[in-house]
Image: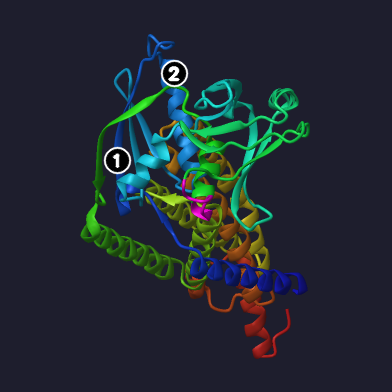
Amino acid sequence: MKNRIIMFWAIVAIVIVSISVLISKPTKFGLDLVGGSRLELQAQKTETISTITPDMMDSLTFAIKKRVNAIGVAETHVQRVGQDRLLVEIPNVSDLDQAKKMIGETAELEFKKNVAKAGDAPKWVATGLTGKDLTAARVDSSQTGQWVVGLEFNATGTKKFADLTRAMVGQQMAIFFNGEMQSAPVIQEPILEGRAQISGGGDNGGFTAKQAKEMVDLLNAGALPVPATIIQENTVGPTLGSDSIQKSQTAGIIGLGLVMLFMIMYYRFPGIIADIALCIYAVILFALFKTIGVTLTLAGIAGFILSVGMAVDANILIFERTKEELRAGRTLYTAITAGFDRAFTSIFDSNMTTIITCTILYYFGTDIVKGFALTLALGVIVSMFSAITVTKNFMLLIFGTKTLTNPWLFGLRNDEIGTAYQATESKKENAKFGVLD
């Protein structure tokens, strides 16, 4: 009993934490539910790229996904269109300029030196040190309080930077970002530790915090493997529309209500416990979605609804097993325990096959399929906790120390109860009239 009480309060604590997460964290929705931006890109040939290959397009797809996700926009849909085009859909970003900035900039960082003679206009030439030699970029503040971008080089970049600064003491080294000079400091001494700073250039007097962060995000996302031009752009509204979303919510509430009503009508008191466990399941699952940043699309919601059905199915298996044990004459505690134990194998096997399928869909499916697979897998895992732990704990906490005096509460008739129950009832009747066995 003590362990069951401890588990009860542990479940209560989990529910309280989950509710606080639901209240404090916003829900992320996909393009089909909240709208966003849709852009079509075309890969460009250059002097060094004469043919756009499928490998190049795969690399471009990966780079764009990495870039947009690094900036904080999840569930970006990137799809190949033809031989050299990509369709990019970014949810919840209706500002086309912002969307283009996320995917359109190439994040080209170059360090250049001046080869012009003294008194002539500067002529900057490449040194061979570029953004490809970086391991990380971060936002820092200088001693004067201005925002700067801190750079860290990899082993190759550290050696290049050390050699350049050693050879250029007393000279300027210019830092260019996407073709625009950011700063051109004079090298005072060799820099050997592989770190540098960009303090901002032009007439802006340095970076703002937003400008520094945008540059850091682009640098950390890396350069695009092949140049790409935006050939079509437009904003889109929710494909379902607010009216359709509202109707879907209404249908979901009605469907869930009917399922909960069926559980109560058919399984009586255990059905009530199952409905409570189902509500706890939904709260925990949605809190988990928000905690790990799952973006809900229509496919993802479908995965959640399917997992709800599987959670109900697990309770049905458990209750049917429990009723079988009661019909066989088991005591209430034994019937409940045996019902859960004997149903566990079936529940575990069915859920594991679903999780394996979800894993395959997630690794080999498209973005939409991945959303469905992720929500379904998480739902199945939480449903096992709900059915095996929550429902069982509540059942044993309420009925664990009692005898079955009213079979109707378990959806059974008196004549369905096995011989052990009948013998118990006979003893009660005999005792009432003073008859000894």
What span is colored magenta in the figure?
203-210
Q: Residue at x 43, y 22 (%)?
A: 226
Say which label, 2 or 1, has the lower sequence index: 1
- Residue 175 horizontal/vertical position (percent): 57, 33
In the image, residue 301 above or below residue 159: below
Examine the image and state in which quarter residue 58 appears. Answer: top left
* Residue underneath mark 2: 56
Label 1 residue SS: strand
- Residue 194 horizontal/vertical position (percent): 73, 33
* Residue underneath mark 1: 38
Nearest to the observer: residue 348 or residue 38:
38
Examine the image and state in which quarter residue 11 appears. Answer: bottom right
Q: Residue at x 60, y 60 (%)?
A: 325
Quadrant of the drawing holding the N terminus: bottom right
* 10 Å crowding of disc 1: few (<14), some (14-19), many (20+): many
Q: Amino acid at mark 2?
A: Met
Circles 2 and 1: CB atoms closer than 8 Å: no
Disc 2/disc 1 C-alpha distance (Å)? 21 Å
Label 2 residue SS: helix
Relative horizontal placement of residue 410, taking residue 137 as reference (left or right): left
Q: Amino acid at mark 1?
A: Arg
Nearest to the observer: residue 251 or residue 185:
185
Examine the image and state in which quarter residue 76 appears. Answer: top left
